[in-house]
Image: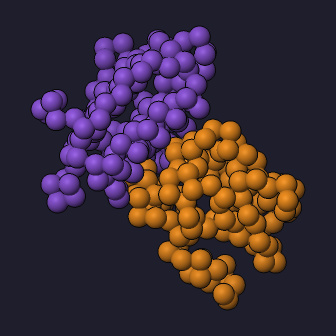
Amino acid sequence: MSDRKRTTVVNIGDLATVRFNDKKIVDSGNIEEMGAELLSLVDRDKMKHVLLNFDGVQFLSSAALNKLIMIDKKVKQAGGNLRLCNLTSEIMEVFTITRLDRVFDIRKTESDALKAFGVSS
Amino acid sequence: MDESNWNWELNETIPSSKEIGHRLIEKLLAALTEVGWDGSEFFHVQMAAEEAMINAVTHGNKEDEKKTIEIEFKVSADSAFLRFKDQGEGFSPEALPDPTDEDHLEVVHGRGVFLIRNMMSEVSYNESGNEVTMLKHRKPEAA
């Protein structure tokens, strides 16, 4: 998808696997773009499931968390599942402190997450 | 805190611009790295600085570029001091709902102040609530 600036997406059937192009997800303009790109996976591309692979992401702000909550709701509304993987220990701590680890399905590796989606890696 | 032991200090008044705020935070992060901060404690200071800056620009000064933000950073090998003062009406941090309450878990705002409180060693607000002062002490084994 050449129109994506903040994310790189590879589709496996009805599962969109997403990697982030930014090491720090903190700039508000970039967060808006990231949110729009993620929402379009469901709205425009009609993907059912979404896997967010945080490999290479070193930092994200609470504004980015808010966008992730929005995309989680969107995916769930469409009857799919959103899973996260490859979080650094620091970013994992953000999810734990805010108890968002209870909202999101977080897997350690991409392989673990793909297995949960029923995809063999 | 023995204030004579700071290795690096910055004291600037900037317009309400996230871009300029981010640039100053990059200087703070470079100063922290310079004196050996890394891992989760580095991340905690970065998170507190980013969230406080965004709060000052967005909620404090309502993105009005005519209004300014006072920013003060001090860094040593074992402590980091951050202060942000905006020109807004201020707020009462105690009045904010707990974002970890079951009813608020999926609300899409209100985690910045909570994260700051959880990631810094000491956090205080002035009476009107438009100034936040934060201190992070490194654990002895990490310093």
The colouring scheme, among rainbow, by chain, secondary structure or one colour, is by chain
Q: Would residue A50 be seen by someone viewing this image from the given angle?
A: no
> In the rendering, at what x and y percent does residue B91 appear?
42, 19
* Chain A: colour as depicted: orange
Outermost residue toward the left in this view: B2
In the rendered image, the vertical position of residue A117 relative to residue A19, given as above or below = below
Question: Would residue B137 be found to the left or right of residue A114 on screen?
Answer: left
Left or right: B133, with A80 as reference point:
left
- Of residues B9 and A61, the one nearer the viewer is B9
Asked whether residue A9 is in view, the answer is: yes
Picture coordinates of residue B37, whole percent (x, y):
31, 52
In the rendered image, the quadrant that contains the C terminus of chain A is bottom right
Placement of the N terminus of chain A among the 4 image quadrants: bottom right
The image quarter containing residue B134 is: top left
Q: In this view of the protein, which residue sits in the foreground, B86 or B27?
A: B27
User: Residue at the spot x=68%, y=39% of the render?
Assistant: A29
Query: Is A118 on the left or on the right of A55, as rendered?
Result: right
Q: Which chain is purple?
A: B
Residue placed at 59% from the left, 32% from the top?
B19
- Measured as percent of width and height from the top left, residue A19 is found at 66, 65
Q: What residue lies at 66% left-to-right and 58% top-to-bottom?
A: A21
Vertical comparison of A12 with B98: above or below: below
Image label count = 0
In the image, what residue occupies the spot 41% across and 64% down? A89
**Picture coordinates of residue B42, whole percent (x, y):** 35, 50
* Picture layout, residue A66 above or below residue A80: above
